[in-house]
Each structure stands twice: as C-alpha cells, then as structure tokens.
Image (tube, rainbow, N blue to C red):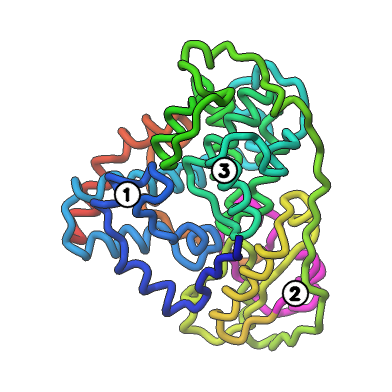
Amino acid sequence: MSEKKYITNYNEIIQLLDQIDPVKYGRTRNFIHGAVTQLSPYISRGVLDTEMIFQHLARKKYTYYQCEKFIQQLLWREYFQRVWQIKKSMIDSDLKNKQENISNWGIPISINNAQTSIHAIDEGIKKLKTEGSMHNHLRMYVAFLSCNLGNSHWYHPAQWMYYYLLDGDWGSNALSWQWVAGTFSNKKYIANQENINHYTGTNQTNTFLDTSYEVLQNLSTPAELKNHEIIDFETNLPENTSIQIDQSLPTLLYNYYNLSPTWKSDIKANRILLLEPAIFKKYPVSDQCISFMIELSSNIKDVQIFTGSFEELKSKTADSTIHYREHPLNEHYQGIEDPRPWILPDADEVTGSFFSFWKKNEKKLRLVFSKNN
C-alpha cells in the first residue's frame, strides 16, 4: 500500500474549504468512502481552526439545517478540547466510570499487526500505519475490539492510535476511546459484522462478529484478541540547532498543536517552533507525524526550530517577551497567553455529556450562523 501524501502548502490547504459539501457530508459521513473533508490534520496541528471553518461555511449561504451535521462534528471537536482544557491530565485516566472487565494494559497483537480477521478493520489499520489516517468509524471499531472484546484498558491502545495519526489530537483521541470503553459514556460501544459491512462496503461473513447484538453483548474474548503486547513508542525529534533571537522583538512560540501561519502574522517577531522532548515522551508520535509537522511549519515566515525544554528556550530569549496560544500542554509556559479560536468562546455545559453541551449551545450556534449568513 503506497503512502498518501497530504498537502502542506497553506494556500492549497485554504482551498480545501471551498470543497466542503455539508449536505453530502451529512448523508455519507459514517461511510468510510463518504464525503469527508480531509481537514482534520490541519485542525489538529492548528493550521486551521473550527471557528475559521464555521465562519467560512456560514458565508457560503448554506442554511443552518443543511450544515447541521457538519457543524455538530465541529462542536464534537470543540467539546473534547473544552473537556481537556478543564480536566487537564485527568483525561489520561478513567474520567467518569471505571472501565469494566480489564484483563490487560496492552494492545491485542492482532490489532497492531492488522491480523484481526475482520478485513475492513485490518485494511484500515494498514492505512493508518502507511498514510497516518483512519476514518472515524473505523477508529470506533478498533477501540471496540481492543477494549470491549479484547478487554484491554483503553490507554495504551489509544496511545498506539495517536502515535500514527497525522490528525492526532490527544484530547479528542483519549476521550473518544473512553467514550467507546464506557469510561466517558453511559455504556460501551459495540458493533457487529453486519454494521461493519454496511459502513465499509464489505460482505464478510462467518467472523466472530457475525452475530446479533444480544449475543455480542456477552461474547467471550475471541482467540484473535487474546494475546497482547505493550509497545515502546519512540519519537525522533530533529537535532537541536542554534537559533537567533532579536531581543528587541517579541518571541512567538509554536508547537505541535499550534502551527498557524496567520497568528500574529502582521508583526515582526522571533518565531520559534518549540519541540519539547518531555511532551513527546509522554505523548509519542511517529516519524511521519514529525515530518508532517515540520513541513506544515514551513508556512510560518522565518520560523526556527528549537528542540529542548521551555526553560532552555526561555534562557535564550532573555528580554524578549514570549507569546503563545493557550493549550493544556502549555501550562508551564511563561509569558503572554492568547486564547485559542473557538466557535463558542462562551460555551455552556462543557463538563457534562456532548448531548447536553449541544443542547445548551445550539441556540447560540444558530444565532452566530445566521449573523454571518
């Protein structure tokens, strides 16, 4: 399987916004060959943001009803970010409920090797490793096999998926796995072979999932998911090189979650992409993810890359004022913090379920949409 190459030029990325078809997206988004937008990697890396996409959609003169499913997905992402913002590192542990029936803290070997015997899932895993992408529905299927049939605790398999995803966002990823495993929802997610066939376009039968939901609820761990492993993930960061700091200018910090070429683009500044080994040790990513990040950073004028801790960088900036965007992984930064762009800066009910978050804020969404339409 050949490796897919995502575009990294900002002008080309922006053009993707005009290709959004919210109506077709709403009808087909759950199918792996549906009209998805391919915007997720750029949102996760902070090149684009949900507020920008929302405003662009409103200006296209679609009705709110036509865009509702697409807007709901933007709000899912914003909801996960809000939960991460509030709960911080607590999202690394079971958040609302304890995961039940855990037998191991690894990942099924068959999932890592793409040998689960479920063809659509195995093909999806191969694509994840070669292209760095996986459809959201397939992500749910993999999490379901790992946690709810393989009885693995969700954390290590979630690390495994995050490691490969070019659109890896730890908040969305960890909380989605917890939602499937029942630690961030009221019940565990399950899917049978009929469901998988329907959404992936396969016709596979006679698998361990080829049964009713009633049987699946109480199914013992199949042989394909009984053996587990713990993987030692490593991140290969670029070697540190010398950087030049003009002390008379402010210093803007970019990182894995903020590669926006438009952030404060109108001012003269030192622009530093900070890569902290401690962050990537806790949340490791693949070589492909690092290459993608570095290519995206080339859209930032005169950006310099610094591999090291914030404290090490701060010692080099001396009298230069540091500016950065708020993010849960930036809490140790010191300087002037800018808020992240939000569709709803004053969102309500951000710690309950997504359903309550949506219901509490839908009127605000409609109002913002109508003002810009």
363 left or right, relative to 288: left
Check disc 3 and report the residue beneath it.
Answer: 84
Q: Residue at x 27, y 58 (%)?
A: 21
Q: Tell me if residue 6 can be seen.
A: yes
Q: Tell me if residue 189 can be seen.
A: no
Q: Marks 3 and 2, how far apart in space?
A: 26 Å
Q: Amino acid at mark 1?
A: Phe
* Circle on res. 192: none
Q: Quadrant of the C terminus?
A: bottom left
Q: Residue at x 68, y 79 (%)?
A: 320
Residue 49 at what x, y percent from top left?
A: 44, 61
Give neighbour class at mark 2: few <14, some 14-19, many 20+ (Cα, 10 Å).
many
Q: Indicate yes or no whether the magenta region holds residue 312.
A: yes
Give neighbour class at mark 3: few <14, some 14-19, many 20+ (Cα, 10 Å).
many
Check disc 1 and report the residue beneath it.
Answer: 70
Q: Residue at x 29, y 65 (%)?
A: 56
3 or 2: tag closer to the N-terminus: 3
Check disc 2 and report the residue beneath it.
Answer: 306
Q: Are marks 2 and 1 in contact (CB under 8 Å)?
A: no
Q: Marks 3 and 1, how far apart in space?
A: 22 Å
Q: Indicate yes or no whether the magenta region holds residue 337.
A: no
Secondary structure state at the residue bearing disc 3: helix
184 left or right, relative to 345: right
Q: Are marks 3 and 1 in contact (CB under 8 Å)?
A: no
8 left or right, relative to 105: left
Residue 311 at what x, y percent from top left?
A: 79, 65
Q: Amino acid at mark 2?
A: Phe
Q: Magenta segment range?
A: 305-334
234 shown above or below 211 = below
33 left or right, relative to 58: right
